[in-house]
Image (tube, rainbow, N blue to C red):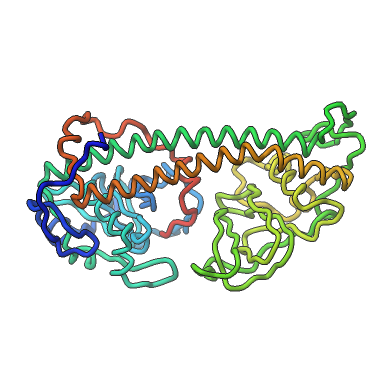
Amino acid sequence: MIVDLKPYLEYRESGLPWVGKVPMHWKSERAKWLFTKMDRPVRDDDEVVTCFRDGMVTLRKNRRLRGFTEATFFFGYQGIRKGDLVIHGMDAFAGAIGVSDSDGKGTPVYNVCQPQDGVNAHYYAYLVREMSQSQWILALAKGIRERSTDFRYEMFGNQFVPLPALEEQEAIVRFLDHANAKIDRYVGAKKKLIKLLNEQKQAIIHRAVTRGLNPDVILKDSGIPWLGGIPEHWEVRRLKFLAHIKTGGKDTVDRVDDGSYPFYVRSQTVEHIDTFSFDGEAVLTAGDGAGVGKVFHYVNGKFEYHQRVYKFSNFRKIDGKFFFHYFKSNLRFEALDASAKSTVDSLRLPLLQNFPTVLPPTFEQAEIVEWIKAESIPVDTAITRLEREIKLLREYRIKLTADVVTGKLDVREAAAKLPTIGKTTEPDFQELDEEAELEEVE
């Protein structure tokens, strides 16, 4: 389907810096003549629609409810209808552009655009996302805060955009939907394999940090229901006696693109910052948000951390790496509090302070850490290879989309051979949100 694609026979200069040459028969038009900005009233039964950075525009409840700035009163909200092109005025630079799959209501920061006759909204969602990918939106838009822009309808409407015939727009959409569905299946299969490998690795680690390396060791009851038996010469101590626990003092407004120090935030990504507040060995976990309860970093050096991230440091009688493996393997809500539910949104300090932690002899902790390192090498190597393959597939998707929506490749013949049913799989919302930015702008 893709190998046989060829360029069009003739091209002309489009006059658009982010597009370059376009097929000779394509027209260009200002976006305001292709879309009408809508300002519909909100109906009583309208639910909140969110425009995500991955290009999906859907009811918020379909994806997740955490990680948003919730509105107490929906002043200024506008009606959104299925089929509208929605452009996030502040996050368009990051790809928050798509066609709504639902009726509902959205924040006034959204540009809600209804296509005119002869215009396929899905084609222009692909096209405007390419404007984002090429950083043309970022170059045009006025910055109003860090890592954001102000890309309103007036600016979008004044832009000249390519205008293929409607039949060609539809062919492009059919082709890209089909290609993206295939890429999604490839990526999904690799991600499932990564998940299995990580589960295998965690099983190896869990047994090592709760039972030790000697399969014939005599066990004793730990006194902790979820922990069960532990080697008879191990101890169990409350975490407050083994490490210092503290939350950070910085918010994400302090992050910079080229900072000298890593900045650990609750979304589990690593940002950068120009200052640091800690220099040494530490383990980090999110205190709230979508990353709550996930132990995600072991570090040794200078760094800064978010005010909603817990730092465990100044370890006493316990090796930092051993603690990291044990904590990551065993931290869960029932381990913190038997009455806690899996939907708890934050970790409270007293629960963390009283978290029961195993304490093998120091020499045995070191042996376990080295054993885990050796056993993890083949698994980590396989995971790294799969992650690289996923990255290449995503880069290929970006390049293919850019070439197709701007007319560098002719997909009309290929699209004609495809089924007309569109996408063949439903999106995995949980999987999408594990990758998405956790703090969407509302």
Total numbered circles: 0
Nearer the observer, 391 or 337: 391
Q: Residue at 77% across / 44% down in the picture?
A: 369
* Whether residue 57 is visible: no
Does residue 276 sit above or below 111 in this rendering?
below
Quadrant assignment, res 157: bottom left
Residue extending furthest toward the left: 25
Q: Position of residue 296 (x, y in %)?
A: 63, 50
Left or right: where 233 falls relative to 420? right
**Which image quarter is the N terminus in?**
top left
Nearer the observer, 413 or 146: 413
Quadrant assignment, res 284: bottom right
Q: Position of residue 174 (x, y in %)?
A: 22, 38
Q: Residue at 35% across / 61% down in the picture?
A: 93
Q: Residue at 12% across / 52% down in the picture?
A: 23
Does residue 115 sit above or below 111 in this rendering?
above
* Whether residue 249 is visible: yes
Residue extending furthest toward the top: 216
Does residue 285 sit above or below 32 in this rendering?
above
Left or right: where 127 falls relative to 384? left
Nearer the observer, 33 or 379: 379
Q: Position of residue 292 (x, y in %)?
A: 61, 50
**Which image quarter is the C terminus in?**
bottom left
Left or right: where 144 falls relative to 164? right
Q: Position of residue 97 (x, y in %)?
A: 31, 54
